[in-house]
Amino acid sequence: MDTHRERVVLEGARFNVHEMDLLGSDGKTYRREVIRHPGAVVLLPMIDKDTIVLIENHRPSVGETLLELPAGTREPDESPEVTAARELVEETGYHSASLSLLHQFYSAPGICDELMHLYVARELTPGEHAREATEQIENRITTRDEVEKWMGQGRIRDAKTYVGLYAFLYSPQCRGSKSP
């Protein structure tokens, strides 16, 4: 039995909005909107085991400059690892000789199917960034102690960054060795 129907109501440059008719347990039909997203990556660029690269990213959608981990949307038919390497250079200027997938998570599963891939970027080499014309980003080299303090103060307000920084602080893959 088909429990829902779906149709596109908005085609965007980076994602589409679909309207769904869901059959409820009471037999009634309920209409919901959902964002269909190609997926994204978030990067944890580790300079060493205690130092990472964050970005200060002005977000017009919320009218704030947020401390974030670099991230970006996958292009059609682009693997998450290729997106990760591209976005790291675009947003920070750093190149990584070692990208490893740490975790996958949904950004907001109540309204969106965006699957985020969290990569740890190691063996970093600085270079020139290639930011989009609309991006207002500055690199922020940050220590483990600063991250702990800022998370405790509620200064980190971006969910993908919170997930990545939690991994930085508590995951054995990010703490375990003397050199990342």
Image: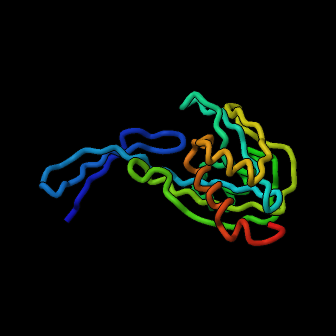
- Whole-percent x, y for residue 153 in the image: 62, 42
Viewer-nearest residue: 178 or 86? 178
Query: Please, is residue 16 above or below residue 116 in the view?
Result: above
Q: Residue at x 42, y 46 (%)?
A: 35
In this view, which residue lies farthest toward the left? 27
* Image coordinates for residue 25, horizontal then vertical, percent: 16, 58
Q: Nearer the viewer, residue 52 or 18?
A: 52
Q: Quadrant of residue 128?
A: top right
Whether 155 is drawn above or below 125: the answer is above
Q: Residue at x 65, y 54 (%)?
A: 165
Q: How is the image coloured?
A: rainbow
Quadrant (top left, top right, bottom left, bottom right) of the C terminus: bottom right
Left or right of 46 on screen, residue 9: left
Q: Could you say which is closer to the camera, residue 128 or residue 79? A: 128
Residue at image point 59% right, 42% down: 154
| Residue occupying image coordinates x 50% and y 52% | 107
Picture quadrant where residue 174 is located: bottom right
